[in-house]
Amino acid sequence: MTSRTLVAQSQTPDGEALTLTLEQGDHVVRVRGEVLMSSRVSGSEEALARLALTERDMRRPPRVLVGGLGMGFTLRAVLDALDDAAQVEVVELLEDVVRWNEGPLAAYAGQPLTDPRVTVIVRDLLTHLTQATSDYDALILDVDNGPEAFTVAANQRLYTPTGLAVMFEALRPGGVMVLWSAFRAPRFERLLRDAGFIASTTTARARGAVRKGARHTLFKAIRPLPR
């Protein structure tokens, strides 16, 4: 039986239990007792950042939004790919997740929240994007479990035609959105195209270069340049 030590606990806005535990040297976050993220797997989160930033405009300092902090792996990959002039906003719904990344989880991704390029915003992502005052070069989203709410019911709004329209408008023409999912969702790719994006789907291993673990789905959606 795996030894499990409770490190911290919190609640989602829906009142569900959110726990941070230490298990055989790794930290694990669970919601309702089910694994949401683990420090032992980060490959697909890092691939998410790489997929988004291959499209960025090199002619100006990029403005990037990371939706969902997780354990900081995606944010670290973003920072490693960008120069010193970049601006990176991290929008995280749960304040306790930010605190955990400043404390027991900080070392896993090399303390990315201390990077001067980073601004942390504790807020609902869709609300933030609705009120954004300028366009992003990239939206890199690891929110919930993919295009089906698992942690917070309100996250489902992101994956509706209305939510996708907000994300489309938040991007500059030529900008790219990538979205992490634990599962395949062919219907969601069709919704992306219906929203005006140039959409495609790829997969990435949960354990990255070691080519082990589950395959996760990455949706890539580009806002077309005007003709």
Image (cartoon, rainbow, N blue to C red):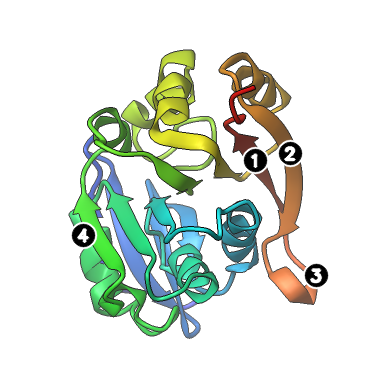
| Mark in the foreground, 4 or 1 | 1
Q: Mark 3 points at which residue?
A: 211
**SS type, badge 3:** loop
Residues packed near mark 1 inside 10 Å, few (<14), some (14 to 19) or many (20 plus): many
Q: Does residue 28 lie above or below 193 as drawn? A: below
**Circle on res. 117:** none
Q: Name the residue under label 4.
A: 96
Residue 69 left/right relative to 148: left
- Whichever of labels 2 and 1 marks the residue nearer the N terminus, that label is 2
| Mark in the foreground, 3 or 2 | 2
- Whichever of labels 4 and 1 marks the residue nearer the N terminus, that label is 4
Kind of residue indicated by mark 3 = Arg
Q: Name the residue under label 1.
A: 220
Q: Where is residue 119 in the image (x, y as percent from the top left)?
A: 24, 61
Q: Which of 185 and 4 is in front in this view?
A: 185
- Whichever of labels 2 and 4 marks the residue nearer the N terminus, that label is 4
Q: Can residue 7 be seen in this view?
A: no
| Mark in the foreground, 1 or 3 | 1
Kind of residue indicated by mark 1 = Lys
